[in-house]
Amino acid sequence: MKHAFSVSGKQQGGFALVAAIFIIVVLALLGIMMVTIGGMQRATASAAVQGARAYHAARAGIEWGAFQALPPTSSCVASSNFTLSVPGLDGFNVTVQCTSTSHRERSPPDYNVYVITSTATSGNFGDANYVSRRIQVTVTSAPP
C-alpha cells in the first residue's frame, strides 16, 4: 500500500529557514527604529539647549537696553545690533530696540516709560540649526 503523503524531515526543513529570515527582518526593523528615535532625541535635546542659549542672549540684550535707558545714562537707543562673544553665547546676534514715552502724574518731575525689545538669533533662517528668541520688557524711571 502506498501513502499519498510522505512525511520526511527533508520536506519540512525549509520552514525553519523562512521563520529565521522573518525574525531577522523584524529585529533589523526594530534596530533601525531605535537608532532613528535616538537620533531624534539627540536633535531635540540639542535644539532645547540652543533655545535656552538664545533666551539668555536675548536676556543679555534686555539688560544692556535697561542699563542704557535708566538713570544715570537715561538714553533710549532706538535700535542697536551687536554680536556676543562670551563663552556659551558666542555667535549670537542681538538686536535691541527701545521706545520711550514721557508721563506726568500730578506734579513734576516727568518720568519715562521704556519698552525694550531684544531679539537674539543664531544661524540662518531655514537652516536646521537656526534659533531665535525675542523678549520684551517695560521699565520706568518713575520714583518709587
Image (spheres, rainbow, N blue to C red):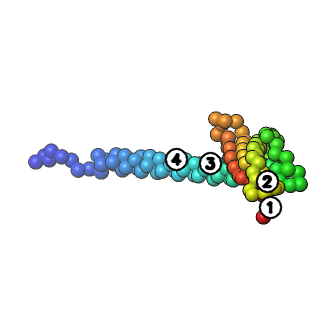
Q: How many marks?
A: 4
| Residue 58 in view | no
Q: Alpha carbon of mark 1 to alpha carbon of mark 2: how far? A: 8 Å
Q: Alpha carbon of mark 3 to alpha carbon of mark 2: how far? A: 48 Å
Q: Are marks 1 and 3 in contact (CB under 8 Å)?
A: no
Q: Which mark is residue 52?
A: none
Q: Position of residue 27 (x, y in %)?
A: 46, 51
Q: Amino acid at mark 4?
A: Ile
Seen at 59% across and 48% down, the residue is 39
* Residue most extreme to the front: 106
User: Nearer the viewer's eye, disc 2 or disc 4?
Assistant: 2
Q: Which mark is residue 32?
A: 4
Which element carries disc 1, helix, strand or loop? loop
The tag earlier along the polypeptide, 4 or 3, is 4
Q: Position of residue 122 (x, y in %)?
A: 73, 42
Q: Alpha carbon of mark 1 to alpha carbon of mark 4: how far? A: 64 Å
Q: Are marks 1 and 2 in contact (CB under 8 Å)?
A: yes
User: Nearer the viewer's eye, disc 1 or disc 3?
Assistant: 1
The tag earlier along the polypeptide, 1 or 2, is 2
Seen at 33% across and 48% down, the residue is 15
Q: Position of residue 36 (x, y in %)?
A: 55, 47
User: Nearer the viewer's eye, disc 1 or disc 4?
Assistant: 1
Q: Which mark is residue 111?
A: 2
The tag earlier along the polypeptide, 2 or 4, is 4
Seen at 47% across and 47% down, the residue is 29
Side of 71 where 121 appears, left or right: left
* Residue most extreme to the left: 1
Q: Alpha carbon of mark 2 to alpha carbon of mark 4: how far? A: 64 Å
Q: Position of residue 103 (x, y in %)?
A: 75, 51
Residue pointed to by mark 3: 43
Q: Alpha carbon of mark 1 to alpha carbon of mark 3: how far? A: 48 Å
